[in-house]
């Protein structure tokens, strides 16, 4: 097995279910999203319902008619089994994957998140198909650490200084959680309890200090247990208690590619301003950032230092660092590093797709929309393609929308697309109008 990207075809696993709490929904699937990075003759492994109309749409825009789709979990039940795990453990799925790769001398596995499962699958494929198998991601222990908010906070504090992160504490039990919340609530107005190894808002539990100040320990304990039961899962420790900064001006995310050290230093590809929804700070989209030079410099410098550390520890592949900027105004903003996304995600995949489709030297203007918090029409993808033909993406990328996955739209649970325009304002306006049309308003 090898860390990196080989010369032969790739296998793409876009399922997010190996991230804690993200396997609790059958509708919120992004298996097709990672396929936007596939090439001719690659294999895209999916679960959930097939969408042949979307597969044709994807092949057409990528000019890659040879992309193959392998569904290993069409009748998903909760909690979902991640598609890499199915390919590793289910004899029929593993056999189908081996048949699809028969005769190949080199194979690369790409996953939404690189886990021990992917490396175990690489080992089994190496033995079975007698090929060189590459994994386009970090070793599993480093991946697990980098995606852990507790470990990342500790590293960021040691590397960038105590003021580089918000005040946070680690709770290893319910009683410790109660004590930390009680102490921090005396000084700060808003807190958030986080599942350290989950992603997005799935593991965020906001706590308003005014609701808990003055509660006796037993009452506070009961309140926190109730809050933490909202996702239907018994709390698993350790958990993170973090101060939720006031006066948050923007939530930037620095998109990195970390190559093998022999290929050069880490690269800052783009800085996005994330669009977050509600108290849980649910990711609902992103725009390329327009920040003051001083803030951008702080973000770039900090991200490069963090990525260089990761590279020296053996990290390879896609990575992003999320931060917030707080203060009285953006020119004098303070940067606090929040977490590392040691994986592909809602901003990095569309960004990479735009880079792939754009002509050399072009920098298209675009907005990313990923919404599941409003009421939408259930819309079959083939019908959606016809209905939105008037705003289909133009070949020069100067205007139009590109749907990134079909699942939420077909169930009426959300929308997921890329909007491009002559400038950022035009891209945002087209995105807003498209969301309104998808809602039926």
Image (tube, grey):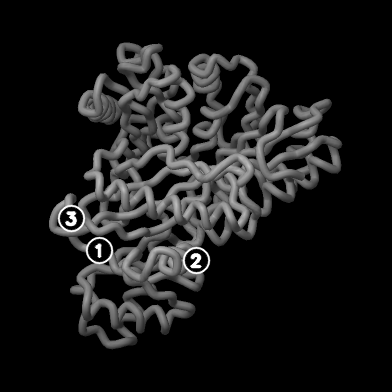
| Residue 67 found in image quarter | top right
Mark 3 vs mark 2: in front: 3
Residue at 52% in and 28% down: 36
Mark 3 vs mark 1: in front: 3
Relative horizontal placement of residue 63, taking residue 305 as reference (left or right): right
Residue linked to disc 2: 151
**Sequence-wise, which precedes: disc 3 or disc 2?**
2
- Give coordinates of residue 402: x percent, y percent: 39, 23
Residue linked to disc 3: 332
Choose between 320 and 381: the one closer to the eye. 320
Separation of disc 3 and disc 2 at Cα? 28 Å
Q: Is residue 149 above or below residue 430?
A: below
Choose between 138 and 313: the one closer to the eye. 313
- Give coordinates of residue 359: x percent, y percent: 43, 17
Relative horizontal placement of residue 56, taking residue 300 as reference (left or right): right
Numbered tag placed on residue 245 in the rendering: 1
Residue at 51% in and 57% down: 147
- Give coordinates of residue 39: x percent, y percent: 60, 23
**Sequence-wise, which precedes: disc 3 or disc 1?**
1
Dot 3: few (<14), some (14–19), or many (≥20) neighbours within 10 Å? few
**Sequence-wise, which precedes: disc 2 or disc 1?**
2
Circle 1 sits in a helix, a strand or a loop, which is it? loop
Dot 2: few (<14), some (14–19), or many (≥20) neighbours within 10 Å? some
Looking at this rendering, what residue extends furthest in the left direction? Answer: 328
Q: Is residue 179 above or below residue 422?
A: below
């Amino acid at each position: 097995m090898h860390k990196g990207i080989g010369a032969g075809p790739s296998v793409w696993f876009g399922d997010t279910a190996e991230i804690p709490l993200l396997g609790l929904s059958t509708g919120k699937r992004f298996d097709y999203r990672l396929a936007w990075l596939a090439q001719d003759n690659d294999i895209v492994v999916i679960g959930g319902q097939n969408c042949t109309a979307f597969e044709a749409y994807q092949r057409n825009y990528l000019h890659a008619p040879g992309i193959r789709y392998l569904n290993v979990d069409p009748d998903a039940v909760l909690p979902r089994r991640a598609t890499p795990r199915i390919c590793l453990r289910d004899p029929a799925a593993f056999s189908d994957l081996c048949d699809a790769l028969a005769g190949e001398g080199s194979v690369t596995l790409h996953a939404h998140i690189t886990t021990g499962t992917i490396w175990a699958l690489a080992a089994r494929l190496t033995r079975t198909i007698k090929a060189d198998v590459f994994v386009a991601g970090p070793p599993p222990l480093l991946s697990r650490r980098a995606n852990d908010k507790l470990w990342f906070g500790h590293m960021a504090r040691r590397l960038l200084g105590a003021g580089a992160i918000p005040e946070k504490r680690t709770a290893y039990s319910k009683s410790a959680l109660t004590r930390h919340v009680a102490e921090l609530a005396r000084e700060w107005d808003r807190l958030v309890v986080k599942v350290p190894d989950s992603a997005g808002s799935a593991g965020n539990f906001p706590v308003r200090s005014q609701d808990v100040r003055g509660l006796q320990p037993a009452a506070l304990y009961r309140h926190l247990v109730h809050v933490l039961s909202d996702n239907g899962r018994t709390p698993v420790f350790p958990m993170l208690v973090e101060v939720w900064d006031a006066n948050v001006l923007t939530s930037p995310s620095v998109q990195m590619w970390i190559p093998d050290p022999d290929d050069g230093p880490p690269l800052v590809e783009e800085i996005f301003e994330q669009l977050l929804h509600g108290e849980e700070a649910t990711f609902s989209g992103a725009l390329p950032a327009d920040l003051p030079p001083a803030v951008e410099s702080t973000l770039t410098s900090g991200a490069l230092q963090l990525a260089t550390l990761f590279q020296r520890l053996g990290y390879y592949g896609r990575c992003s660092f999320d931060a917030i900027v707080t203060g009285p105004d953006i020119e004098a903003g303070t940067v606090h590093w929040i977490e590392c996304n040691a994986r592909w995600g809602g901003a990095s995949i569309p960004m990479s797709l735009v880079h792939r489709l754009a002509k050399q030297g072009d920098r298209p203007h675009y907005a990313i929309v990923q919404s599941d918090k409003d009421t939408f029409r259930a819309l079959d993808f083939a019908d959606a393609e016809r209905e939105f033909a008037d705003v289909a993406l133009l070949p020069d990328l100067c205007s139009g929308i590109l749907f990134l996955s079909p699942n939420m739209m077909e169930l009426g649970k959300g929308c997921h697309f890329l909007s491009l325009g002559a400038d950022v304002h035009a891209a945002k306006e087209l995105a807003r109008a498209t969301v309104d049309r998808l809602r039926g308003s």
